[in-house]
Amino acid sequence: MARRRRKKLPVDPVAAEIESLAHDGRGVAHVDGKVTFIHGGLPGERVMFRYIGKRSKLDEGIAVSVENNPSPDRVEPLCPHFGVCGGCALQHLDSRKQILAKQEILLDALNHIGKVEVAEVLPPLRLEQPWGYRRKARLGVKYVPKKGKVLVGFRERGTPYLADLTRCEVLHPLVGEHLEEIGALIDGLSIRDRIPQIELAMGDEGCIFIFRILEALSEDDGKALLEFGEGAGIEIWIQDGGPETVRPLSQGKSGAALRYALPDEDITIEFRPEDFTQVNYDLNRLMVNRALELLDPQADDKVLDLFCGLGNFTLPLARRAAEVVGVEGDAGLVQRARLNAERNGITNTRYFTANLYESLNKEPWMLESFDKALLDPPRSGALEVLEHLPKLGVERIVYVSCYPSTLARDAGELVNRHGYKLLAAGVMDMFPHTAHVESIALFERVL
C-alpha cells in the first residue's frame, strides 16, 4: 500500500483576527471557518501568520507580524530566545495581563467543565518581579556535533530538539545566566554524549545539580564537575540508575537536605533535591498564607491534609489547628514530613502513607472524623477521594490545583454530587510567562 503523503503547507503568510487566548497561551482565530491556533497572537490583533500544522479539525500557525492594531497589552519579550524555546508561552503579554488571562481560563473551565458558578473570584496572587523565580527544573542536555557543542536547557517549541540557549530569564540567575558555561563544562567531559539531563534543585540557600549519567564518569570527569561546582556554589550529585541511585558525587558529602522557609509561621522545610517542591518560593509563601486564610483553621479543628508531600501546608495548619493528619502516597515524603514536624517542634501532626487513587476503606484514618480538609493533588486531580470527604464529616475544603480542567471536574463533583458550595476561587502565578495555571478554591458543605 502506498504511503499517504502529507499535504504541503501554504508558504505565504495568511491574515487572521485573534479572538481569544487558548489555555496554552496560543491565540485563537477562525480562518476559512476553521479553528486555528496561532503562537504569538493576542486577542484583538490582526496578524500575518504562517502555517506550521494542518489537521482535519484544526490548524496551527505562528505569527510573523502584527498588522496595524497591536494589542495594548503586548510587550517586548525579555528573553532573546522567546518564540523558539518552548519553556515560555506568554512573554509577549504584559505579566499583569497574563494572570488575568489565566483567571479567565479557570472561570471558563469551572463553568463549562464543572458546570458550577463561583460566588467570589479571589484577587490573583502574583509577584511584582516575575523573573528569575524558578528554583526547580529538569534541564535537557544534548551534544550536537553539527553545532560543535553541548546544549543545555528546554526544548524548542513544538519539536523534540533542545533549543540553543545562551540564557534563561525564568530560571534563578545562578543557573539561568550560565547555561553556556554549563554546556561547556559537559562538552569537556569524556561522556558528554551520555548525559541526557540535569535536575536543578535550590533552597532559599544552596543549589544542587543532579547529573543523569548513562556511563561512568572518569576520574578527570569527576574532578572537573567538582571544581565547577565549588567555583559556582553548586553541589554536584549524580544518578546512574533508578531514583535510589541519586547521591552526592563527592565522597565527603553527606547528602544534607536543602531548605526553604515559611517565615510567617516560623517554619523551615527540609527536602532532598529529587523531592517535589513548588518552583517559586516567594509565590508559595503567598499561596500558603491564602490557604490558611480560606480554610480558617480554629484552635479546636481537626484537619485532613491530602497529598501532603513534605508538609508545605500540614505544618502551617498545625500552628493553628488542634491536629492535622497528613496523607501522601510517597513513603519517602511521608518520612521527611514527620522529620520536618520534629525539627519545627510541631507535635500535633500525624502522617499516613496511602495511594489516594485506590480503595481507602482499610486505611485507619478513614475511621476518624475531620472538620476541614486541604487537597493539593497532582495534575490528575483528586476525583477518587472526593466521595469520602462528606462521610468523614468535612465541612470546609480548600483545594489547591495545578491544572484547571481537573479542578473544574472535581468542583462539579463536590457541588453537584456531594453537597458542597463553591464559595471562592482564584489563580496564582506560580509560573509567570508560561501557560501553567495554578489555582485555589474554597468549598463549604451545605447539605
Image (cartoon, grey):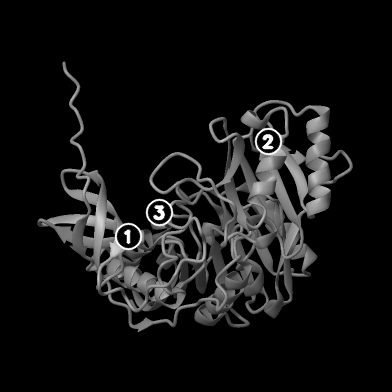
Query: Mark 2 packing: few (<14 Cα in 10 Å), some, or many (20+)?
Result: some
Residue that carries the numbered disc 2 in the rendered image? 187
Q: Answer left or right for 343 relative to 60.
A: right
- Closer to the camera: disc 1 or disc 2? 2
Q: Amino acid at mark 1?
A: Arg
How far across and how far down the image is residue 348, in percent?
A: 70, 69
Residue that carries the numbered disc 1 in the rendered image? 26
Sequence-wise, the earlier of marks 2 and 3 is 2
How far across and how far down the image is residue 242, in percent?
A: 64, 33
Q: CA distance from mark 2 to mark 3?
A: 47 Å
Residue that carries the numbered disc 3 in the rendered image? 384
Q: Answer left or right for 149 relative to 189.
A: left
Q: CA distance from mark 1 to mark 2?
A: 35 Å
Q: Secondary structure at mark 1?
A: loop
Q: Secondary structure at mark 2?
A: helix
Q: Amino acid at mark 3?
A: Glu
The residue at 51%/62% (across/down) is: 376
